[in-house]
Every structure is written in C-alpha cells, then in structure tokens.
Amino acid sequence: MISISDLRASYEGAEILHGISAAFPEGKISVLMGPNGCGKSTTLRSLMRMVPQTSGSMTLNGQELGSMTPQELARQIAYLPQSRNVPDISVERLVLHGRFPYLSYPRRYRKEDWEKVWQALEWVGLSGMRERKMENLSGGQRQKAYLAMALAQDTKVILMDEPTTFLDIKNQFDMLDRARSLANGGKTVIMILHDFESILHYADYVVLMAEGRILTVGGAETVLRSVEIKEAFGVQPCFYETDDGVHCYVKP
C-alpha cells in the first residue's frame, strides 16, 4: 500500500500541495480527480520524487520513498506521464527501457529482460509491431507501447496521468480494461481521470482534490454523489439506473 501523510510539495518556490493525506490500496484502481491545476499531477510526480517534498511522508508498505535510491524507486513504481516526446526508436527498444532499473552500465540485456519485454508486448497486443518505429504508430498504439514499457519494469505500483487522453472511445475502454486487469492481478494502480462515467465504473477508490487539498475520499459513487463535487467542479452529476447498473451524466 502507498500512503501519504500531511504531504506538502512545492514547485519553483510555490507550494502546490498543502498537507494532503491518503492511502492507496493494493489490487485496486485509485483515481485522483479534480479541476485542472488542483495538484493531481503534482501528487503523482511527488511519489516519483520529481517534485520537491517540503514536509510530510510518503511510504510504500511502510518504507519511506525518500529513503530509496532512484534505481530502487524505479523497481517499485512505474510512471506513465500524460505527454511524452515520441522517440526515434522501435517499439521493442522503447519497452526495453523498462528494464533499465535492473541493469548496470554498460547495459547488457539478459534472457529474463527479453522475456519480460516480450511478455509485456504480448499482453498489450503489440507483439506483431515490435520492430515498427514509434513515430509510425497511432495514438492508441503508442499508449499501449508505453504501458508495455511500464509492465516490463515489473513494479508493484503503476501511476497513470490521464491515460485515456487523446484516445478514441474504443481505445479508452481498452486502456481502462487493462488497468482493471492489472489491479485484479494485485498491482496498485493510481490514475488521473476526468470522465465521471469512467470513474464510476472503473475506480475502486477516489480522491477528490481542489486547490492542492483533498476535499473527500471514498468509493466512486459515494464521492460522485457528495456535496464536495459541486464545490470542486461547479456541477452536480445526475444518476440513473439500467439493467447493467448505475450510470451518471453531467449537465450545466
């Protein structure tokens, strides 16, 4: 389990996170939600120690993240940022980057490294594209390639910053279904999502943020029905039921 307690973090001299506390359980999808600029991405980047932590604690199964070397941290947590440059390399070479935390310099790939890469490519459905250049993939295929790189990293925790951005509907569902499979397999998945309906059906645990603070936490439907949603977004979801469960939509 990842836990953060009274976490404060700053960027370029300005405090972005103002003493937030939450716990993200294993084998579950936890979603950070809130308006733009509320600190969601900063929270993920703080867990990766990419943003200076000014106070508070962050632990993984009781061990302080700050006590880990960068290599040790990379063996525990994989991070998929929202935006990335498209490297001039093949899909297979990109996924091999996920094995870097396990290699010394100069890097010499072992049999187990190649096996992890091939397993990851098979899992995301890109085995037949491993020699294709990244620049020649569609947006959905690129997202799968980066997910494969995270899987090859073989971590307990996967952080995803808006993983469905720029994807068409089919690929959005595919990405979220794969996140569900990862959580069902025991991984701790923490992601940022904006779509209320997707949050309702995929999130096990929701952290609602606004202005660098946590407003409320809980199950997806509980948080979406809370008065804090109106406070954060200025809108209130509407709910309806069908044979396959509860759904929601948002109106101005």
Image (tube, rainbow, N blue to C red):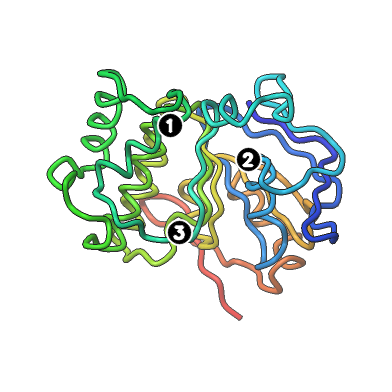
Residue 132 or residue 39, whichever sits in front: 132
Of callouts 3 and 1, the N-terminal one: 3
Q: Are marks 3 and 2 in contact (CB under 8 Å)?
A: no
Label 1 Cα neighbours within 10 Å, binned few <14 / some 14-19 / many ≥20: some
Q: CA distance from mark 3 to mark 1?
A: 18 Å
Q: Nearer the viewer, mark 2 or mark 1?
A: 1
Residue denoted by label 2: 48
> Who comes first in sequence, dot 3 or dot 2?
2
- Viewport quadrant of the C terminus: bottom right
Instruction: Return the residue found at the far front.
Output: 106
Q: Residues within 10 Å of mark 2 (few under 14, many from 20)?
A: some
Q: Give SS at disc 2.
A: loop
Judge from the rendering whether residue 120 lies leftward or rightward of residue 218; answer left or right.
Answer: left
Q: Which mark is residue 220?
A: none
Q: Amino acid type of disc 2?
A: Met
Q: Residue 243 at what x, y percent from top left?
A: 36, 52
**Badge 3 is on which residue?**
84
